[in-house]
Image (cartoon, rainbow, N blue to C red):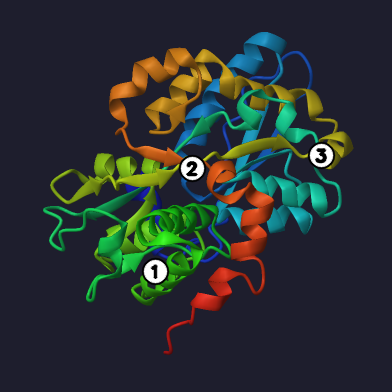
Amino acid sequence: MSLRRDFIKLSLGAGVAGAMALSALPTFAQGGAGPVTLLNVSYDPTRELYVDYNQAFAKYWKAKTGQDVTVKQSHGGSGKQARSIIDGIDADVATLALGGDIDALVTHGGLVKPDWQKRLPHNSAPYTSTIVFLVKKGNPKGLKDWDDLVKPGVQVITPNPKTSGGARWNYLAAWEFAKRKYGGDAKAKEYIGNLFKNVPVLDTGARGATITFVQRGVGDVLLAWENEAFLALKEFGPEKFEIVVPSISILAEPSVAVVDKVVDKKGTRAVAEEYLKYLYSDEGQDIAGRNFYRPTSDKAKAKYDKQFPKLTLVTIDQAFGGWAKADKEHFADGGSFDQIYAPKQK
C-alpha cells in the first residue's frame, strides 16, 4: 500500500482519529498444520514496513513448516494502541513506538512478561529511527534547528504525546536540545511551552500528523519519524518537500514483544515468537532498511549507511533515565506536558 493511497483513504475519514486500519495477507494453499492468523498491533507509520515484512514472513514460514499464516495489522498512535491491547484486543504481538508502551502491557494485567526486553537482541528493538524536520521545498521559513521552531509565525505540526509514541520522541528530543542550549530543565520547560504555542492542532498519531502537513497543507514544519519523512519524499517527490536534520535528536527505539497471555490462550506462541525473531534475519533487516528504518545488524547497517544522515543522537536512558522516569515526569497526568500545554480555544 502506498503512502499516497493510505493518505487519501485516511483523509476521507477511514481512521484518522483512531487510525485503526486492519489489513490481511491472502492465505496460501493449505499444507502441513492448519492455517493460523496473527494480529500485530503496531504504531502509526509502520504500515508500509509490515505490508512488506508480512509477505516475506508468510513465505518463510510456509517453506519452513508447511503452514499458512495470515498476519493482520492494526495501526494507530502507540499509546492508544497499547491501551487497546489492555482493553482486550487479541494482539499476538505488539510492535510499538517505545519500550514504555510495552511496559504498560506488563503493568496492566500482566499481558506481557517482565523479561520481554531480554528475549530478543538489542533490548527487543529490531530497528531504530530518529526525529527530523520535514519542510516545504525551499524551506521558506528557513528552519535549521530546534530553536527556530519557537519563532513567531512558525506553525509546527506534531501529534499528541498523550496518545502518540512519535510525539513523545519529538517532545524529548526538543527538551534535550533546549536543556543543553539554554541550561537546565527549567529553561527546557519554558522552551517546550513556547514550542507548543506554535502547534495549531494535535493529531492522535504520527500518520495523522503527516496527513495534516503533507495532504492538508497545514503548518510550516512537521516533526517526523525519519522513516516517515523519507517516505513522504519518496511518494510526493523532492520537488514538494525536503528534510532538515537538526543538530541533535534522539535515538528512537521501537520495541516488539509477544503478548504472552494472548498467544497462550490462542495457541499461537510458536509462530508469534518466530514472527518477531525473523525481524532480525538478513531479510527482515533488509526490509527495515528499504522502508527507511535504521537496521541493527552490521550487514544491513553497512548496506544502508549512506541512506541516513549523520547527527548527534541521545538515548532515553542517558538523557532521561529510561522510559519509566520520562513518562512519570513528562507525560503522566500532571507531568510537564500537562503543565505547559493549553488547548487552543475554538
Which element type, helix, strand or loop, lies under badge 2? helix
Q: Is residue 262 left or right of residue 118?
A: right
Find disc 2 in the rendering and name its residue: 47
Which element type, helix, strand or loop, lies under badge 3? loop
Q: CA distance from mark 3 to mark 2?
A: 27 Å
Circle 2: residue type: Arg
Any part of residue 8 in sight: no
Residue 222 falls in which quadrant of the image? bottom left
Q: Nearer the viewer, residue 187 or 46?
A: 187
Quadrant where the image shows the C terminus: bottom left
Tag 1 or tag 2, which sits nearer the N-term? Answer: 2
Tag 1 or tag 3, which sits nearer the N-term? Answer: 3
Q: How far across and how far down the image is residue 48, in percent?
A: 44, 38
Q: Is residue 252 left or right of residue 74?
A: left
The residue that appears at 70% across and 12% down in the rendered structure is 66
The residue that appears at 49% across and 21% down in the rendered structure is 285
Find disc 1 in the rendering and name its residue: 191
Q: Nearer the viewer, residue 82 or 128?
A: 128
**Which mark identifies residue 114?**
3
Do callouts 3 and 1 mark residues in contact (Cβ within 8 Å)? no
Any part of residue 156 in sight: yes
Residue 38 falls in which quadrant of the image? top right
Q: Nearer the viewer, residue 32 or 346?
A: 346
Foreground mark, 3 or 1, reads: 1
Label 3 crowd (10 A; few <14 / some 14-19 / many >=20): few
Foreground mark, 2 or 1, reads: 1
Circle 3: residue type: Pro
Label 2 crowd (10 A; few <14 / some 14-19 / many >=20): many
Q: CA distance from mark 2 to mark 1?
A: 33 Å
Residue farthest toward the bottom in the current orientation of the protein: 346
Q: CA distance from mark 3 to mark 1?
A: 36 Å
Circle 1: residue type: Tyr
